Image (tube, grey):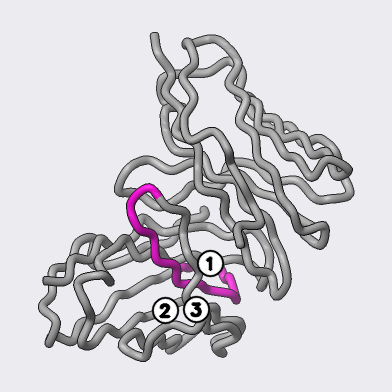
């Protein structure tokens, strides 16, 4: 089983809203990742957690705030986003940092 | 700087024939390479990988070839099927385990 789940599937939010994206895996993976993907572009890494600790922040604006409450769960808190933040947000996990990553279906975010 | 390049944005192939997707990289420190397949509005699905110590890895209809001296990677799909129509990304693992993705190749398999 290589399933990573993400909720919600779609999200529309205004620039003053606060919302959260959720990612879950039950494969016992200890590394989890957030990516952003714009249309017809490759995924861009945002954050990496390893053993529930933030390992990598790719200079992401503070309006994106990740959280890893436990080894199975990864959240991305959104606040005061801009229309250019509209994209597909992908979560991935791997057994350990650097190993093969398995992606969730993504959350399609639209910021109005 | 783009360290992983897929120079063909699209590929059209007839059902039953071979699809060959190419990927070039510039960083000789990459030690692990992966191919992902992506349907619209879905997350990438892992297909196949290869370590830099190997030159070939096969899994069913999918074979990945690695030419380290040329810094070139290719994915062969044979025979191609209509369900293979998707965008294919190659990715390379660099420092801190971070993946660098190519821009993707849109494959269309025609009947």
Q: Are marks 1 and 3 on the same chain?
A: yes
Q: Which x, y percent locates residue A98?
A: 68, 68
User: As drawn, is A21 to the left or to the right of A110?
Assistant: right
Please, what secondary structure does the residue beneath circle 3 have?
Answer: strand
Please provide the residue range marked out in magenta.
A25-40
Q: Quadrant of the N terminus of chain B?
A: bottom right
Q: Are marks 2 and 3 on the same chain?
A: yes
Q: How busy is the neighbourhood of tag 2: few (under 14 within 10 Å), some, or many (20 plus)?
A: many
Spatial CA distance of label 2 from label 1 is: 10 Å
Q: Are marks 2 and 1 in contact (CB under 8 Å)?
A: yes
* Chain of the residue where label 3 is placed in the rendered structure: A
Q: Are marks 2 and 3 in contact (CB under 8 Å)?
A: no
Between label 1 and label 3, give the one nearer the viewer: 3
Q: Which x, y percent locates residue B58?
A: 73, 32
Q: How busy is the neighbourhood of tag 1: few (under 14 within 10 Å), some, or many (20 plus)?
A: many
Q: Which x, y percent locates residue A42?
A: 47, 54
Residue A27 covered by magenta stretch: yes
Q: Which x, y percent locates residue B54?
A: 86, 43
Q: In which quarter of the view is residue B77 placed?
A: top right
Spatial CA distance of label 2 from label 3 is: 11 Å
In this view, B15 is above or below A2: above
Please, what secondary structure does the residue beneath circle 2 have?
Answer: strand
Residue with the mark numbered 3: A47
Residue with the mark numbered 2: A74
* Chain of the residue where label 2 is placed in the rendered structure: A
Residue with the mark numbered 1: A93
Q: Quadrant of the C terminus of chain B?
A: top left
Of callouts 2 and 3, which one flags the residue occurring earlier in the amino acid sequence? Answer: 3
């Amino acid at each position: 089983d290589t399933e990573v789940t993400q909720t919600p599937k779609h999200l529309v939010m205004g620039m003053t809203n606060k919302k959260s994206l959720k990612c879950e895996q039950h494969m016992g993976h200890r590394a989890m990742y957030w990516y952003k993907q714009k249309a017809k572009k490759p995924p861009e890494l945002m954050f990496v957690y390893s053993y529930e600790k933030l390992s990598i922040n790719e200079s992401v604006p503070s309006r994106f705030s990740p959280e890893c409450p436990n080894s199975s769960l990864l959240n991305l808190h959104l606040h005061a986003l801009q229309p250019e933040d509209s994209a597909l947000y992908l979560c991935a996990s791997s057994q350990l940092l650097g190993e093969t990553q398995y992606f969730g279906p993504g959350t399609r975010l639209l910021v109005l | 700087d783009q360290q992983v390049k897929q120079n063909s944005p699209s590929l059209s192939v007839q059902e039953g024939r071979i699809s060959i997707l190419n990927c070039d990289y510039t960083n000789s420190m990459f030690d692990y390479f992966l191919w992902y397949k992506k349907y619209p509005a879905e997350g990438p699905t892992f297909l196949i990988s290869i370590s830099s110590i190997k030159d070939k890895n096969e899994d069913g209809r999918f074979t990945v070839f690695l030419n380290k001296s040329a810094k070139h990677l290719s994915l062969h799909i044979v025979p191609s099927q209509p369900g293979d129509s998707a965008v294919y990304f190659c990715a390379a693992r660099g420092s801190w385990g971070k993946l660098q993705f190519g821009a993707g190749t849109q494959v269309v398999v025609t009947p």
